[in-house]
Amino acid sequence: MVLLALLVTGCVTNTDSRFAREADRDKAVKNYVELATAYIGQDNTDRARNHLDRALELDPDNPGALAAMGMVYQSEGEPELAERSFKDALSSDSDYTRGRVYYGAFLYSERRFEDARDQFLAASRDTGYGERASVFFNLGLTEERVDNLEGAIKAYRRAVELSRGDARSLLALSRTLVESGEYQAASRHYSRLMSLMQRNRNLRHSPESLYTGIRIANHFGDRDQASSLGLQLKNNFPNSVEYQQYRVMTSNGQ
């Protein structure tokens, strides 16, 4: 009985020790990946790589480390190595949504818009992902790039809903609604954007927001609003594409 008790105790101790070692390893890998991601955000790829090398030594198939290494390669102008790392990350864990988002952003930067759309569309199905609003915003961008305006509007609507109306999503939705001729809906969302800007002094007009507002104002015959926004566009962004479009619009008497 004593011998049996000792054997059982020994087994439990060894198992606990193994789990403890695995937990320590997983924690170390997680910390290395978080540090590396922070360094990538600072464009310090050398330090990021050092941390990722350590993470991959501990866990060669860790999807977070592999995806982050893909971003390092992307920053260093190595697209083939970057894509291989992103694919390895998703092969290791097909449910790793953050890695799928990274891969989609990489594909977008490579102008492979249909492939990027597929990645963002897959990522958007993960209802537990904490940054779904950004995923839908990126999906909207790719839908525009493949000339699917209806799909872009649908994606931007979801981005607005999930973000509870952040500025960039409201503007993108307003602009694409104008492009599709849905001025009433565009005006409603643009008004939300203007209210948001009035409450938050850190938000400033861009050429895109001014030109979108001008088009809405012109459609509803609000000459004062159109002139006011046009003056801001001229004074603040005289070299923008939107100002050139505005000049063409006014010269045509629109």
Image (tube, helix red, strand yellow):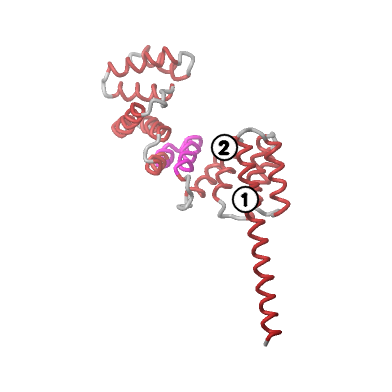
Position of residue 63 measured from the top left corner of the image (x, y, whole percent): 63, 51
Three-letter code, disc 1: Lys
Per the rendered image, the range of residues in magenta is 133-155
- Which label's residue is closer to the chain start, 1 or 2? 1
Query: Looking at the image, which residue is at 64% across and 33% down?
Result: 43
| Front-most of residues 61 and 233 | 61
Viewer-side residue, 128 vs 15: 15
Would you say residue 146 sits in the magenta stretch?
yes
Give the quarter of the image for residue 24: bottom right
- Does dot 2 land on a helix, a strand or a loop? helix
Q: Quick check: 111 left or right of 47? A: left
**Numbered badge on residue 68:** none
Q: CA distance from mark 1 to mark 2?
A: 27 Å
The residue that label 1 is drawn on is 30
* Residue under numbered circle 2: 108
Magenta portion: prevailing SS class = helix
Q: Residue furthest bottom?
A: 1
Residue type at numbered disc 2: Tyr
Disc 2 crowd, CA 10 A, few/some/many (<14, 14-19, 20+): some
Outermost residue, front side = 2
To which quarter of the image does residue 102 belong? top right
Residue 96 x, y percent position in the rendering: 57, 52
Q: Are marks 1 and 2 in contact (CB under 8 Å)?
A: no
The C terminus, quarter of image: top left
Q: How many marks?
A: 2
**Quadrant the N terminus occupies:** bottom right
Select label 1 or label 2 by which is in front: 1
From the top left corner, tell me how far across and down residue 97 is, in percent.
54, 50
Check disc 1 and report its element: helix, strand or loop.
helix
